[in-house]
Image (cartoon, rainbow, N blue to C red):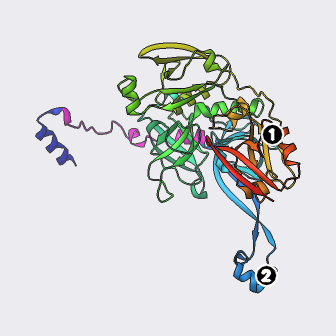
Amino acid sequence: MAVAIGLVGALMGGSAYAVDRTVPPSEAALRYSFSPIVKRVSPAVVNVYASRVVQQRVSPFMDDPFFRRFFGGDMNDAPRKRVQQSLGSGVIVDPAGVVVTNYHVIANADEVKVALSDKREYEAEVLLKDERMDLAVLKLKDAGGHFPVVSYADSDALEVGDLVLAIGDPFGVGQTVTSGIVSALARTQIGASDYQFFVQTDAAINPGNSGGALVDMDGNLVGINTAIYSRSGGSIGIGFAIPSNMVRVVAQSALKDGRLRLAWVGAGFQQVTPEIAEGLGIGRPRGALVTDVETDSPADKAGLRSGDLVVSVDGVEVDDPNGFNYRIATKGVGGAAKLAYIRGGKEGATQLDLVAAPETPARDERAIPGSSPFAGATVVNLSPAVVEEQAYQGKRRKGVLIQSVDKGSPASGVGFRPGDVVVEVNGAKVETTAELAKIAGQDASRYRLVIERGGRLIRSQVGR
């Protein structure tokens, strides 16, 4: 290698390519280690065990009509209970035993346990879980005492090339530490959560690392390890972590009242393509292009209009709508944010009030009973708060949104999905859950349905 480098330098004809090699100044310099950081941080990184009970048939052949025909319905057909388990990692962020992990680690769990690095185990209750963020906050039960914690760092201060350590429990082999650098920032096309703005690292992250800590050289939390890009399931040096500034907002919300309230903007945004950038005369694609503004929303009161290009939030440049959403989300609720925008080729600035989305009308959550096509669906009234919580992508701001659908229910059989909006039933417009419950309670042999899904209207007929 020394010969190769020297030859390149000679061929280039200059000393700019020469490498200055020196002998380590002391024996101590050969012993530089991350161990002091690991010793301080690792007690606050935990294992998270989630389990749930599922029904499963003993004989897989009973799903085959051929075997049912010849052997009848009693071929050990009774479903039996089986426990499914998942393993992940977590980080203690509060000395009272508050743990942050990924939503996907504990999703649908009936029981969650946390194991500390010193082998102590605790049952945990879920204080808050949010699928949009892919984050969950747990509280250790019956856990008196003062637990070690990892302090938050300002993830906005990270730079590409910074050294980081990933700590977690990959493959269940036990706590493991890997080192690397921040290889990219503000990754937004990952698909791991709705609020995409990830820290990318080449520190090895593998299955079981989800929910673990990504820390800087001061031993402070810069991210929660969440996803990897891999074709084999193992690390190839492309891992992603949720920035600590987002983690902090979620954890604080959990400790406050268990509900995550994000600032409501009341506007839609579009990615700027090279063609749009050329039309706007901005040179390169950047910013979040306003597509629509709701009346009386914070965006409306701030004077934003369709066609405005928001280019920064509080002086921090915005590259795309995901970046804008992240900046607003990490501001929390309260106060205001200064937005810079371009309108008609001219720069402007305005102030956006950071307020929670109102729940008007009240959500009036209802589980629809009976035998109608809606039986087994849980529905709520649309409101700005529901739109934000459910990440609803449609254009309607009034109506009834299907929040969940029970498996095996009539609603599931019809094909309803969470996020669908009921527009009409048998020619009558449906605007409240009370109206839908009344219609579902009537005796009808056929239902003519109009549903909005992903901005499209779907018409169908269902008979009983």
Name the residue rendered at 54%, 30% in the picture: 269
Q: In the rendered image of this protein, does residue 241 appear above or below residue 314?
A: below
The mark found on residue 75 in the picture is: 2
Position of 361 with respect to 194 (left or right) is: right
Instruction: Find numbered disc 2 in the image and state the secondary structure of the residue it sits on.
Output: loop
Q: In the rendered image of this protein, does residue 86 appear above or below residue 362?
A: below
Q: In the rendered image of this protein, does residue 134 appear above or below residue 395?
A: below
Instruction: Find numbered disc 1 in the image and state the secondary structure of the residue it sits on.
Output: loop
Q: Position of residue 359 (x, y in %)?
A: 76, 28
Position of 100 with respect to 316 (left or right) is: right
The residue that mark 1 highlights is 144
Name the residue rendered at 70%, 45% in the picture: 450
Q: Which of the two discs, 2 and 1, labels the residue nearer the N terminus? A: 2
Q: Position of residue 229 (x, y in %)?
A: 48, 50
The magenta-colored residue range is 16-41
Name the residue rendered at 50%, 21% in the picture: 308
